[in-house]
């Protein structure tokens, strides 16, 4: 199966390496330095497992700067470009994700587009309506920066925001590359999957804030 991963940060690159164990994978990024490092089997990210798998693993993986050519004949296209939170608008900046989705639809309308960037609740329904497409689904990530590939090899759960054959195939692809067996897998509606991701992030942020306050108290007292 041909899979293209667009955006080779820690989310995109860890997914590319995971899937390249059993599939043809092309990673696309706008950074030439990053593309060159990956093609030289060196990790541009500080992540022990990524470094090991790129150096020693048997991977059907190459990186490219050319999105339009890379996605031709792709079965799945994973979008993992940045969506930083804009404090002025109180909203996620999804422009890079939308731009990539439009390019993929033009170049390979048959592909299933799986968004793994963090997005607001309702994004998938909105983009489907505005672009008149059913190609887009969402599958949230629960990865730690610095341990992203480890977390993909031993995932706490797999969530795909659609109940369909293509969603089940994608979940199987993720599980196929993992080392953990009997992974909890959940298929939901798109809004439910988007909510799972945002509330997971919120819960993590609350935990971090709580322990920071304990640390401040200990230092003060």
Image (cartoon, helix red, strand yellow):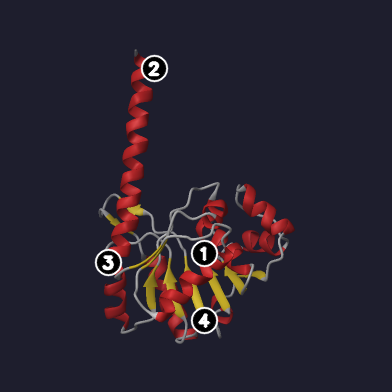
Outermost top residue: 221
| Above/below status of 167 relative to 205 | below
Of residues 63 and 168, the one drawn nearer to the viewer in this rendering: 168
Q: Quadrant of the C terminus?
A: top left
Mark with earlier residue (4, 3): 4
Residue 191's disc is: 3
Mark with earlier residue (3, 2): 3
Which residue is denoted by mark 4 in the rendering?
75
Q: Which of labels 2 and 1 is toward the front?
A: 2
Residue 215 pos. (x, y %): 38, 24
Of residues 83 and 79, the one drawn nearer to the viewer in this rendering: 79
Residue 39's disc is: none
Mark 4: few, some, or many residues within 10 Å (few <14, many ≥20)?
A: some
Which residue is denoted by mark 2 in the rendering?
219
Which residue is denoted by mark 1 in the rendering?
7
Tell me, yes or no, if residue 82 can be seen here.
yes
């Amino acid at each position: 199966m041909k899979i293209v991963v667009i955006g080779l940060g820690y989310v995109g690159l860890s997914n590319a390496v995971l899937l390249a164990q059993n599939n043809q994978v092309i990673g696309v990024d706008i950074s030439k330095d990053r593309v060159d490092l990956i093609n030289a089997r060196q990790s541009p990210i500080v992540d022990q497992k990524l470094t090991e798998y790129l150096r020693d693993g048997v991977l059907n993986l190459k990186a490219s700067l050319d999105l339009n050519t890379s996605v031709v004949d792709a079965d799945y296209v994973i979008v993992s470009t940045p969506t930083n939170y804009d404090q002025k608008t109180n909203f996620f900046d999804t422009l890079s994700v939308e731009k990539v989705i439009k390019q993929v639809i033009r170049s390979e309308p048959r592909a299933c587009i799986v968004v793994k960037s963090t997005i607001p609740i309702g994004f998938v329904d909105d983009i489907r309506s505005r672009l008149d497409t059913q190609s887009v689904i969402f599958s949230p990530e629960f990865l730690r920066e610095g341990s992203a590939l480890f977390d993909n090899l031993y995932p706490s759960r797999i969530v795909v925001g659609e109940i369909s054959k293509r969603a089940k195939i994608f979940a199987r692809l993720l599980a196929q590359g993992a080392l953990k067996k009997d992974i909890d897998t959940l298929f939901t509606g798109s809004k439910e999957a988007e909510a799972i991701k945002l509330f997971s992030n919120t819960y993590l942020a609350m935990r971090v804030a709580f322990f920071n306050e304990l640390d401040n108290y200990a230092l003060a007292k």
